[in-house]
Amino acid sequence: MMIKKDLTGLRQEYAAVSLYEHTAHSNPFIQFANWLDQAIMAELPEPNAMTLASVDHHGKPHARVVLLKELDERGFVFYTNYNSNKGQELNRNPHAALVFLWLELHRQVRVEGLVEKVPENDSDTYFASRPVSSQLGAIASPQSTVIRSRDSLEKQFETIKATLTGKAIKRPDHWGGYRLIPDRFEFWQGRENRLHDRLLYVSGKDGWTISRLAP
Ligand SMILES: Cc1cc2nc3c(=O)[nH]c(=O)nc-3n(C[C@H](O)[C@H](O)[C@H](O)COP(=O)(O)O)c2cc1C
């Protein structure tokens, strides 16, 4: 079967909003939080979804979507399986990148930095706040490994459910959070005539410096 799609005619003008050095916040975390709030207020689907890129031991990049669960001035926290492909990649090479895409607002944010595991207590607290079915799923799924079938996964889930029903469910050691500590942010705002705004924040010894990049 041949699949061929021509998307060269798909084009949209982005005109409504702008991003200037004097209106953007000098602290990129606050600038990010403002845009995230606006994405939430606009009722975009999954506004906290972000593409996470990591690099394997051959230097090959891999990207997938995860959900931002906590944000403060330390960084961006997401939860996952530490034994997954991403977990193994990040444990070996903590350099990572995030991309948020808020298409309806014509906005993209790129965040780069180093990841570290969050303290075990924090992972315990978040794990305990999840619905029981999600807790069981995290225990049942050997994320990123090849499995025999859908059926075998469901059986594994049912077995774990039967074993743990009525008991306190403890966070498995292989599941927890990572915090990406940014040293670089780029805010992209779509503008007319493809003259988009791009503000780059880079962390240095005197704090954050802002520069404008050509679109
Ligand atoms: C909207 C969305 C949200 C997701 N959120 C998470 C998440 O928070 N944590 C996670 O481990 N996987 C999440 N996933 C699944 C990942 O994209 C990915 O399939 C999985 O983590 C395995 O990736 P890996 O094999 O590269 O480790 C999400 C997928 C989608 C589409």
Image (tube, rainbow, N blue to C red):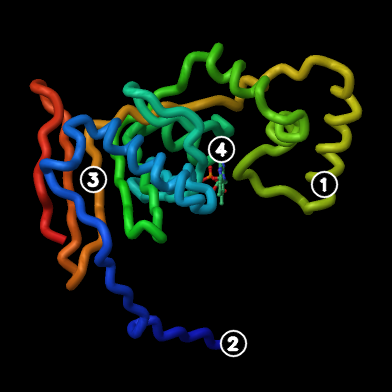
Can you identify the residue that label 4 sits on?
Answer: 84
Query: Could one spot residue 202 in this view of the protein?
Result: yes
For image coordinates 77% across by 34% down, the residue present is 133
Residue 1, label in figure? 2
Report the residue marked by disc 3.
Answer: 186
Closest to the observer: 58 or 178? 178
Answer whether labels 2 and 4 touch (C-beta < 8 Å): no
Up/down of 84 relative to 120, above or below: below
Please tell me which of labels 3 and 1 falls first in the chain.
Answer: 1
Alpha carbons under labels 1 and 2: distance apart: 31 Å
Residue 87 x %, y %: 50, 34
* Amino acid type of the residue tagged 1 in the rendering: Ser
Judged from the image, the secondary structure of the residue bearing numbered disc 3 is: strand
Mark earlier in primary sequence (2, 3): 2
Q: Quadrant of the N terminus?
A: bottom right
How far apart are the alpha carbons under marks 2 and 3?
40 Å
